[in-house]
């Protein structure tokens, strides 16, 4: 069965067969998964003590030059799985004690994901995405996803074009995140300290891009009030992929850059959130995509 694709904001009209596709993401209709295992490196109320049940999908509709997961986003690593197999994977992870099922970069496999979530799961579902997705795609997840974990990478369209081939990213991501919040409302924590529902907006601070970070923080502060969303300021940037072609980002963050970002977050009045320790240990955050659990 062939499918002319308009799932993501690119609406590239690619013809996607079951296992092949000629679109921007390069994927077919059948979901491909590179890893499915407990993951301990999400924000504390998502990972908890037993981990988040992270299912890493292959392929991506962005082309971030610094992608830390390039081996699966563009490297074609992954195994084709049916919606039925996806559901088996979810329940195997739940049996291992994970606190939630965490679907990582699944936008381009949306029909397969929706089929795998026809029946509710006994734990929250986390939609872990770049936020580069259409409002219609996010709406289709209503009632199936309890926790949204989107990036807000850029408010600077020029940077979005240069580093991710998506000049429309800022406006697209804003619309998607607003729809996520409309669905699930203010975040809700359980007595166990775990997130039960809500939106956690992530932002990865890039070298030499402090003004972009400040613009992201201003938008969050102006758009959401106290107790509405959680914000995660991330320091784990490591030059990988094609970052070496861009001298201004071909290094780790400095302490001064991250401290300036954290200080501005405080000045914006964003108190519901998380900071990372400035760390050079990138391997802590990037698992082995070796088909574990698939």
Image (cartoon, grey):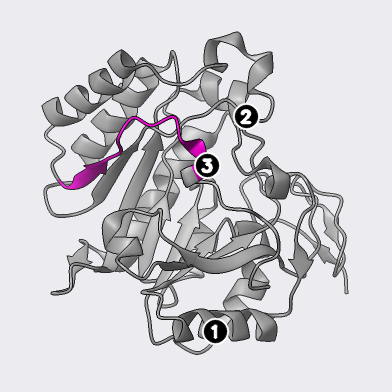
Mark 1–mark 3 Cα distance, whole angstroms, equals 25 Å
Up-down: is 276 above or below 38?
Answer: above
Distance between the alpha carbons at the discs numbered 3 and 2: 12 Å
The residue that appears at 13% across and 54% down in the rendered structure is 227
Residue 274 seen in the current view: yes
Q: Closest to the observer: 89 or 142?
A: 89
For disc 1, the marked residue is 92
Q: Which residue is mark 2?
A: 240
Horizontal and vertical percent position of residue 289: 66, 55
* Coordinates of residue 193 in the picture (x, y in percent): 18, 67
Q: For label 1, count other residues whose C-alpha is less than 10 Å away and answer few (under 14), some (14-19) or many (20+).
A: some
Q: Secondary structure at mark 3?
A: helix
Residue at image location 64% in from the left, 40% down from the top: 62
Distance from the alpha carbon under mark 2 to that under mark 1: 32 Å
Return the x and y of residue 104 as percentages of the image width and height: 54, 59
User: Residue 292 appears at what percent x and percent y?
Assistant: 65, 67
Residue 283 tag number? 3
- Labels 2 and 1: the sequence-earlier one: 1
- Nearer the observer: mark 1 or 3; the answer is 3
**Residues shaded magenta:** 272-283
SS class, disc 2 = loop
Which residue occupies 73% across, 79% down? Answer: 82
- Quick check: can you spot residue 182? no
């Amino acid at each position: 069965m062939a499918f002319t694709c308009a799932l993501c904001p690119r609406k590239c009209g690619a013809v996607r067969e079951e296992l092949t596709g000629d679109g921007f993401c390069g994927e077919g209709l059948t979901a491909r998964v590179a890893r499915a295992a407990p993951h301990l490196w999400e924000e504390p109320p998502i990972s908890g003590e037993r981990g988040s049940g992270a299912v890493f999908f292959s392929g991506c509709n962005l082309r971030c030059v610094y992608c830390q997961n390039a081996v699966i986003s563009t490297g074609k690593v992954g195994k084709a799985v049916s919606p039925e197999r996806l559901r088996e994977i979810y329940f195997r992870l739940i049996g291992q004690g994970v606190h939630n099922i965490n679907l990582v970069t699944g936008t381009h496999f949306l029909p397969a994901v929706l089929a795998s979530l026809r029946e509710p799961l006994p734990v929250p579902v986390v939609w872990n995405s770049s936020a580069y997705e259409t409002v219609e795609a996010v709406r289709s997840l209503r009632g199936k996803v309890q926790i949204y974990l989107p990036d807000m990478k850029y408010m600077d369209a020029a940077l979005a074009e240069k580093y991710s081939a998506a000049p429309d990213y800022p406006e697209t991501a804003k619309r998607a995140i607003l729809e996520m919040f409309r669905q699930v409302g203010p975040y809700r924590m359980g007595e166990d300290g775990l997130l039960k529902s809500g939106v956690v907006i992530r932002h990865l601070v890039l070298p030499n891009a402090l003004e972009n970070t400040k613009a992201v923080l201003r938008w969050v502060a102006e758009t959401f009030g106290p107790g509405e969303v959680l914000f995660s300021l991330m320091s784990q940037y490591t030059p990988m992929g094609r970052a070496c072609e861009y001298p201004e980002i071909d290094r780790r963050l400095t302490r001064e850059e991250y401290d300036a970002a954290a200080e501005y977050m405080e000045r914006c009045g964003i108190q519901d959130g998380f900071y990372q320790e400035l760390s050079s240990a990138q391997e802590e955050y990037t698992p082995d995509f070796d088909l574990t659990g698939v």
